[in-house]
Amino acid sequence: MQKKDEECGAGRVIRGSVLSALLPITVTGAQVLSKVGGSVLLVAARPPGFQVREAIWRSLWPSEELLATFFRGSLETLYHSRFLGRAQLHSNLSLELGPLESGDSGNFSVLMVDTRGQTWTQTLQLKVYDAVPRPVVQVFIAVGGDAQPPKTCQVFLSCWAPNISEITYSWRRETTMDFGMEPHSLFTDGQLLSVSLGPEDRGVAYSCIVSNPVSWDLATVTPWDSCHHEAAPGKASYKDVLLVAVPVSLLLMLVTLFSAWHWGPCSGRNPAGAGGRWRRWSSWRGGGLGPPPI
């Protein structure tokens, strides 16, 4: 009797082991990041000893579509989907997508079946970012009522990257390792930097760095040049700079005009204190330095 019970118990263990081996397994993968115009490889990971007999790649969101299949040793990607002509299934069953477009972000899954009939499902999230463009840096300075170069120049540096989202702004002082050598402050999520300069800062440059998870770019300016030329008589006003020296797009001009209105005398504000005024001297794109044409 005891031997029979042991045999029954062993049978239940074996049947349970077989049943658990045939149960479907689902694995949630990590987020995969890429940028517009690039390509991405969605890796089909599987456990050791898992001999794939069939595999199916699908897009789950924002729309459910069949992308690629592996069946009886044959790879197939010619399915009607938004990735038609942009999908390649490799021999290791990883799926390559590209060139990517801004609307390609979404969730993807691969279903694999081994030679014993066990299934393995893996899901991945793809997020596609736009490449960060070159930022635009504008220089605003405050000067006194006289026409002589001041000993100290209060400068606001404004940084902006057009037509982009999910980016961060940061500033780097060039030619020195100590960023805190002069009073400074940051506003509006790092887009605006306030610095106080003296003649010893004549050659000091500042870089605005814009970045997202997959790309970055920067623009560099030397603000003391604007301090010096702003104080000299007969120089062009910020309106001349807008009309002559800044051939930018309509959207960029609208943003520039808004910035000039926000910090200019017409806004009713006077950040420079009594007797002072704020003026925008120039726009800087990339490494373009120097005063506007007279």
Image (spheres, rainbow, N blue to C red):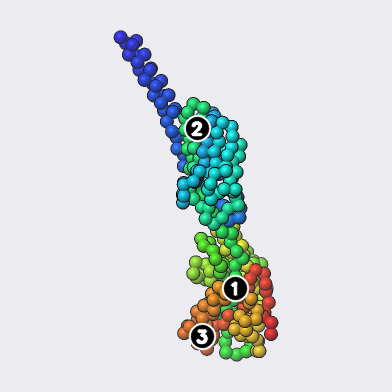
Q: State how many labels appear.
A: 3
Image: 218 above or below 265: above
Find numbered disc 2 in the image and state the secondary structure of the residue it sits on: strand
Q: Amino acid at mark 3?
A: Pro
Q: In 3D space, how far apart are the residues under numbered discs 1 and 2 (Cα atoms)?
A: 54 Å
- Give the labeled residue for mark 3: 265
Q: Which residue is mark 2?
A: 113
In the rendered view of the protein, which quadrant contains the C terminus?
bottom right
The three-letter code of the residue at mark 2 reads Val
Query: Sequence order check: which comes first, mark 3 or mark 2?
Result: 2
Please provide percent x and percent y for residue 212. Answer: 55, 58
Give the mark nearer the N terminus: 1 vs 2: 2
Q: Secondary structure at mark 1?
A: loop
Nearest the eye: 85 or 281: 85
Q: Amino acid at mark 1?
A: Ser
Residue in front for this viewpoint, 167 or 53: 53
In the image, taking residue 92 as reference, residue 12 lies left or right, namely left
- Residue 192: x, y in percent? 53, 71
Residue tagged 1:
249
